[in-house]
Image (tube, rainbow, N blue to C red):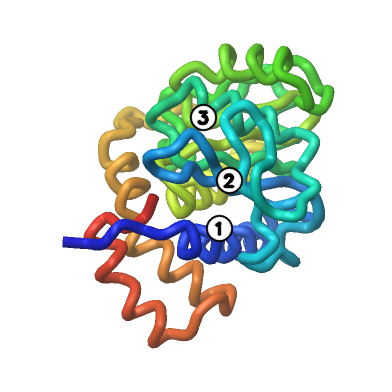
Amino acid sequence: MATRTTVTELKQRLVDGLRVLTGEEVLSGSGHLSVRIPGTETFLINPRFAGVLADPKDICTVTFEGRRIAGKGPIPSETPIHSAIYRNRADVGGVLHCHARYSILLGLQDIGLVPFNREARMFADGVPIFPDSHGINNDDLARRMVETLGAHHAIFLRGHGCVVVGPGIEGTCISAIQLERACQDQLFLMSFTTVKPITDASRARVNARLENPYRSWPFLLYKHGVKSKARIRASIRTLKEGEHY
């Protein structure tokens, strides 16, 4: 049986996620990734500087009320995004807010995301659009955003990027990468044809991959030089056993 993930391990995996997202051009100098600390009403989040520069010692611990209780900080001004989602979505273990280029562009289109290929199928249940482009830096805006998000796995913030949620760090990162790719592909297709959804756009198999990402995640860690091949191979068994909050 797998042992419970420690907070120290979660911090390292959060830092790994920030590096992967930056390498995939989903995250830039701004944006933030968080993970729920299992069994508590707290979460970990990178401080208010470029995520790729963060080390595990920089990661902050924040309550579901948005109060920093550990870490030097400062925490991101839009931390209410994370606290509001964790308070209202028990199924969510990881949250990302970013300003990915193609997600911003498609989020400005009324058509929204069409589940037309493998990447977009991950969001077959839809990606709602939150109409307020202001930074979500207070509880009222965060509450309204969560209401618009509903049970979905991502939301476009019109003109301001997107928010992606998942079962944990790895699943959230994979979802965000897939969303950005799907947005890019759809915008390209829209330049010369009408984009139509595929007929078998079901989330069942997709959810299984997100909850146990032992294939996609090791590849991304290796691609961006986050870990050596030997360390990645050693970690695959842990991922298969479900040690990926």
Q: Position of residue 205 (x, y in %)?
A: 27, 41
Which residue carries the number 1 mark?
14
Q: Position of residue 116 (x, y in %)?
A: 46, 35
177 displayed left or right of 203: right
Residue 201 tag number? none
| Quadrant housing the N terminus | bottom left
Which residue carries the number 3 mark?
86
Mark 3 packing: few (<14 Cα in 10 Å), some, or many (20+)?
many
At numbered mark 3, what does the secondary structure look like: helix, strand or loop? helix
Q: Please indicate, yes or no, whether residue 185 appears anywhere in the rendered image.
A: no
For residue 135, above or below residue 185: above
Give the residue displayed 50% in from the left and 16% down from the top: 150
CA distance for labels 2 and 3: 10 Å
Q: Residue type at mark 3?
A: Tyr
Query: Which comes sooner in the sequence, label 3 or label 1?
Result: 1
Across the whole image, how many numbered discs are drawn on residues? 3
